[in-house]
Image (cartoon, grey):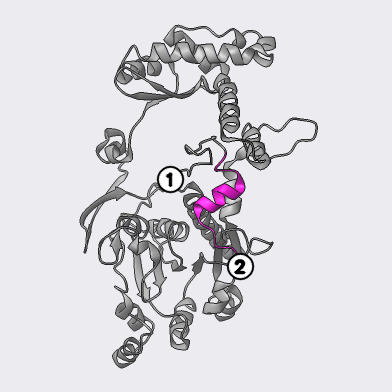
Amino acid sequence: MAGLLDGIKVVEFSEVIAGPWGGMMLADLGAEVVKVEPVEGEPWRFATPFSGSESRWFISLNRGKRDLAVNLRTEEGRSVIHRLVAESDVVVVNYRPDTPAALGIDYETLSGLNPRLVYVEATAFGRRGPSAHRPGYDLIVQAVTGLLAADGKTSEAGVPAPTSPPVADYGTGYAIAWAAASGLFARERSGQGLKIEVSLLGVALGMLGYTFMEMPGLPKPDATEVLRQAWRDGRSRAERDRQRSETLSRLAAVNVYYRCYETADSVIAIAALNNPLRKKFLEVVGLEDARLEDRGLAEGPEATEIGVVLVALAEIRLKERTTAEWLEAFDAAGVPAGPFNTAVELVDDPQIEANDMVLEQVHPAAGRVRMLGPVLRPLGHETIPSRPSPLLGEHVDELLKELGYSEAEIVALRSSGVVL
C-alpha cells in the first residue's frame, strides 16, 4: 500500500541519533531515503558494534534507507551528490553550521541546483550566536538548557547526573520529520522550495514547558534554582546535599499524586493530576488530604508537612498489595496508573502486540530483528518497512547506475576512493 510520502525522495546527511531518527520516520511513511555516509562509515555504526560496522544503535535508527558511502571532500564525490540532489525533494542535514558549506551541501549550493528543494537543517545551538560553532550532543544540550537539572538527579559527588535516554536527540528527530512534512506541504502551495532550521537547543527548551517562562511579579517555579545557586557559590558538598534534601522534601508534597510507589511485588506509577483524580486515588488507598478541601492549607506553610506525611502513609499502603491488584483497583476507579517495566520486557507485551507496534525484519548481519515499527499509523496508508538498516555502502552501485553512471565510471570512482 502506498505510504503518505510515496514518491518523495529524501537525501540524508546526518549521523548519530537526531538526523537518522528523523530520516527513518520519513522512510516509515513511504519516502525513498538515501543515507549519505563517509566512506569510513558514520560514528554510530561503531557504537558497541556486534559485527564489523554494525551496531544495535545503528540498526535501530536507519531502517528503510539505501546507503551511499561517498567522500564529499573530493570534487568527484560532490558531483555525485549534486546529481542526486537535483532529482530529490528533501535534504536533511544534521552537522555543525560550518560543515555543509565545506562539503558543498549547504542550502545556497543545493537550492541553486534544485529550486524546489525542501532543506531541513538541524544544529545543536542554532546557526547564530556565541555557541553556534560548538558541536552539541544530547548531554551537552541538556546541561545548557536546564533539562538536566529539571528532576534534581545528582551523582554521589553532588553534580548533575546524565539523563537517559537522549530525549533532546530523539525529540529533534521528530522535529526534523515534522519540518520536512511541513516544508513539502508549503511547497505544494507555493511551488518553491525552502529552508527550515531546527535545533537541539530549541527542542530541549520546549520540553521544559512552563519552567522556561518569565512572568514579572511571580516567583520562578523552578525548584532546582536552590541547587544551582549552591554550585555557583561554591558551598560545601554537605551543605549542597542538605539543601537538595530540603528541596526534594518540599517537592514531595506536590509529587504525592505523581510518582512511583513500591508494591508488594514490584513498582507502580501514579499520575493523578487534578483534584477529582486525586480524590479517587485517596479513596482507593484509604487516605485523606485536607488540602483538597481547604485552599488555605494547600497554599500555606502546613502544605509541605501534610504532603510529607501523606507520602509516607501512601508508601506503606501501596506495599500491602501486588501491582496487579492495585491496577485492578485503580482501573475500576478511573485513576491513571501503570506498571513499571523495562524496554526488554515489552517486545512480547500483549498491549504492544495488540497495536502491532513490533516490526520483524531479517538483517544481513544481525539475522532476525524485532524492533519498534512505524510511530505514525495513517489509516489506509500504512506501510510495512521491508528494508532493514543498510550495510555501509550497500547501495553504491545501484544508486550510481540510477544517476546515469556507467560501469566504467563506477569502477573509476571506487578505485580512486571517492565511493566505497
Q: Quadrant of residue 120?
A: bottom right
- Between 246 and 219, the one lying in front of the other is 246
Residue at x 68% of width, y 40% of height: 233
Which amino acid type is marked by label 1?
A: Pro
Q: Which residue is mark 2?
A: 194
Using the image as rendered, state which of residue 227 and residue 224 is in the foreground: 227
Question: In this view of the protein, which residue sits in the foreground, 350 or 283?
Answer: 283
Q: Which residue is mark 1?
A: 165
Check disc 2 and report its element: helix, strand or loop: strand
On-image quarter of the N terminus: bottom left
Q: Is residue 323 left or right of residue 333?
A: left
Residue 22 on image: x %, y %? 46, 57
Placement of 263 over or under 36, stated as above or below:
above
Residue found at x 29% / y 68%: 391
Mark number displayed over residue 278: none
Q: Going by the image, does 156 lie left or right of 113?
A: left
- For the record, the magenta segment spans 134-149
Magenta segment includes 144: yes
Front-most of 260 and 328? 260
Q: Which numbered mark, 1 or 2, is in the foreground of this view? A: 1
- Residue 329 at x, y = what percent? 37, 14
Q: Assess disc 2: are there few (<14), some (14-19) or many (≥20) residues with their C-alpha within 10 Å of its C-alpha.
A: some
Question: Residue 183: image x %, image y %?
Answer: 56, 61
